[in-house]
Image (cartoon, rainbow, N blue to C red):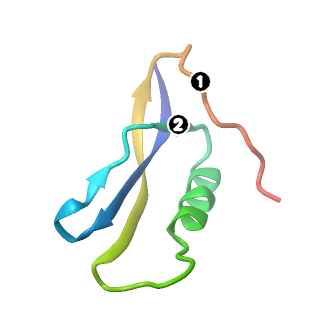
Amino acid sequence: MIQVFMLVLVMGIGEDRKSIDETLYFRSIEVCNATAKELAKRWGHWSILDQVSVYCLPTSVDKNTPLMDVPID
């Protein structure tokens, strides 16, 4: 097992909010947070009921789990 950061994405409108099942794991908290920041941006019409919550959680995964290794520019 290795320690990584898991990106959690919750989106939807009002009561239809749901967690997105596709999970991304990152070696670096900086890269995970940068990805979360971009995913949280809203384009177009925004309302208080139409929100996206994105955050990174520390977790353990098997050492063979694919990890995101994209460097920050």
Circles 2 and 1: CB distance less than 8 Å? yes
Is residue 2 or residue 50 the one in the foreground?
50
Identify the residue under disc 2. Answer: 25
Give above or below for 65 relative to 40.
above
> Residue 61, how many percent across, how many down?
44, 24
Q: Residue at left 37%, top 46%?
A: 20
> Residue 14, how many percent across, how many down?
21, 71
> Residue 23, how many percent across, how many down?
45, 37
Is residue 14 or residue 22 the one in the foreground?
14
Task: Answer with mark 2 or mark 1, whichever residue precedes in sequence.
Answer: 2
Q: Residue furthest left?
A: 15
Is residue 19 or residue 16 the one in the foreground?
16
Q: Residue at left 55%, top 62%?
A: 39
- The quadrant of the picture occupied by the N terminus is top left
Identify the residue under disc 1. Answer: 66
* Left or right: where 53 falls relative to 41: left
Q: Residue furthest right?
A: 73
Label count reads 2
Q: Residue at left 48%, top 31%?
A: 3
Q: Residue at left 53%, top 20%?
A: 65
Tell me the SS state at disc 1. Answer: loop
Tell me the SS state at disc 2. Answer: strand
> Residue 59, how many percent across, how many down?
39, 36
Q: Residue furthest front?
A: 45
* Left or right: where 32 falls relative to 49: right
Residue type indicated by callout 1: Pro
